[in-house]
Image (cartoon, rainbow, N blue to C red):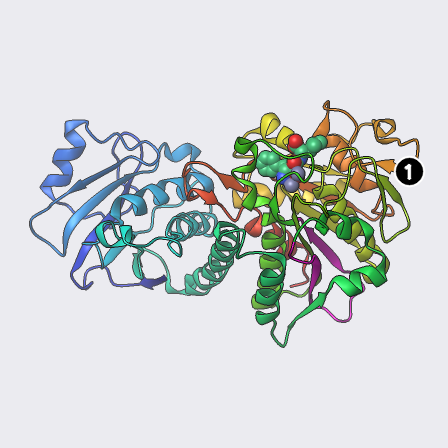
Amino acid sequence: MKIVVSPSFDERPKGDLLLVPYWEGGSSASSLAPAHDVLTAVLRSGDFKGKVGDVSIVYPGEGQELRICLLGLGRQAVVTAEVLRRAYAAGVKAARVKKNKIVHLLFPKTDPITVEEALRGVIEGVLLSNYAFTELKGDSLIDSPVVLFEQLTLFGLDKKHQKTIDSLQTIAAAVYRARTWVNRNADDANPTQLAEEALRLKTKGLEVTLIDQKRLEKEGMGLLLAVGRGSRHAPCMIQASYRGDPKSKEHILLVGKGVTYDTGGLCLKTPEGMLSMKCDMAGSAVVFAAVQLAEQLKLKINVSALMPLTENAIGSGSYKQGDVYRACNGKTVEILNTDAEGRLILADAIAYGVKRLSPSAIIDVGTLTGAMVITLGEEMAGFFSNDETLSKELSAASIETGEALWRLPLYDYKEALASDIADLANVGGRDASSMKAALFLQEFTDSVPWVHIDMAGPAYISKPKHYHPTKGTGWGVRLLIQFLKHRSRS
Ligand code: BES
Ligand code: ZN
Ligand code: ZN
């Protein structure tokens, strides 16, 4: 979808719908709101309260648009970019019926927040909700077609902001791609196909290389190979690198869990537990999108993404409980639960990254533990870190993008991961299980500043929420690119 800023509201062409924002209580949030009697009547009736996301569609019978949609933004004093995201997403949802092709939007007054913050909120609210995954729909699309906007015109904003809008659009496209990778059939989005797709997306500035099974063997990545053993699709790892600041030694390493389907392996999941497990490669989708964005936005930064890709399948070849496997840094791991596979493939990839890429900071992302969903719910991710600065930077980025994130402690529970026959066990009891996954990963970081993000909650949701569609949300793409933007030299 294209969003264009138009300076002349009075001379606008005829449209199907005009979206007009109001504060709670009914005062107009835009000086361009037309003075139609029907709007006054709606506001007087008390039917429209102006709370965040309230919508009411009226037919003015005259003027430039056939329909006007009143949109509530809540109380002006407490408006934030996130409030605007949610409100404009509700407006877009109400307006997304097939009759509305030419849609006009009024940009709201921005105080007490800045124009830039408001712009981010409005544009992201509109763009992130204008997505639908229809690849797997058939005839049902004929009776109930999915309407997506192709163009929206924004009034009440200086034209100089068009550039920012264009870059927000590039970011939204990356979020869509991450969602689509997750939403596809796990059978299609298998390690081989995801690797092929990543290789296809390589450009002059974005180097994409495949580390295939043979190379994994040479590198001694026994943990990733172990998890992949039960599947007919060979495991592999993709490295995507962008060097936007060749003079600098700084190099950020992103590592994303890429389990294309998690059956639990021999420790088989329950049907309910397995139902959403096509989401288990969301971490890989997010880190790839972030590096690609760093290149598209030409950030002055060096960043690489590692995507260990495998299926955690059940079969006669599956890796076994009680057996011991060796990571590429030589550490041995006793498998006490084959369903705790995410930490195994991340550990191998982190150790590989530390050895080969000398990163100055590592951020790993993945859908690691069900316990994190219990702790923070479907809307928040938790993170663990060995570094205060990195943690603060990430928390700040999260507030800006609205991707809610909470730091959890790395308490000294390491003895729970002790093994009688290996250097480490992959699990250590049910208590503090998200933290134990983090403690396990920490063993592979070689004390490089590091963050582990467990996004098992928000990566994949069962019902649409705010500007997220159902299923894959693309959670984390905006967070990582915002973090990288702040880290980059401008
Ligand atoms: N992929 C799952 C975690 C998950 C659960 C992601 C729910 C998204 C939603 C992970 O591989 C897993 O199975 N973790 C186990 C760890 C346990 C065996 C220590 C879990 O959470 O039960
Ligand atoms: Zn698992
Ligand atoms: Zn998993």
Write down the quadrant of residue 489 in the picture: bottom right
Question: In the visual, does 285 lie left or right of 391?
Answer: left
Front residue of 147/425: it is 425
Quadrant occupied by the C terminus: bottom right
Q: Is residue 236 magenta?
A: yes
Front residue of 152/304: it is 304
**Location of residue 322 in the rendering, given as x and y in whole percent from the top left corner:** 82, 35
Please, what is the three-letter code of the amino acid marked with disc 1?
Ala
Write down the quadrant of residue 321 in the picture: top right
Front residue of 65/213: it is 213
- The local crowd at label 1, few if under 14, some if 14 to 19, many if 20 or more residues have their Cα within 10 Å, is some
Q: Is residue 238 magenta?
A: yes
Quadrant occupied by the N terminus: bottom left
Residue, x 49% and y 46% (percent of image)?
472
Front residue of 112/71: it is 71
Residue range in magenta is 232-257
Q: Secondary structure at mark 1?
A: loop
**Location of residue 281 in the rendering, given as x and y in whole percent from the top left corner:** 60, 49
The relative height of residue 133 versus residue 442 in the rendered view (above or below) is below
**Location of residue 224 in the rendering, given as x and y in whole percent from the top left corner:** 76, 51
Residue occupying the far bottom of the picture:
204
Residue occupying the far left of the picture:
61
The relative height of residue 392 versus residue 428 in the rendered view (above or below) is below
Tell me the quadrant of ligand 3.
top right
**Location of residue 34 in the rendering, given as x and y in whole percent from the top left corner:** 18, 48
Residue, x 57% and y 69% (percent of image)?
201
Question: In the visual, does 104 lie left or right of 426?
Answer: left
Residue occupying the far front of the picture:
316
The relative height of residue 206 versus residue 88 in the rendered view (above or below) is below
Question: In the visual, does 184 lie left or right of 330?
Answer: left
Residue under pointer 1: 422
Number of numbered discs overlaid on the protein picture:
1
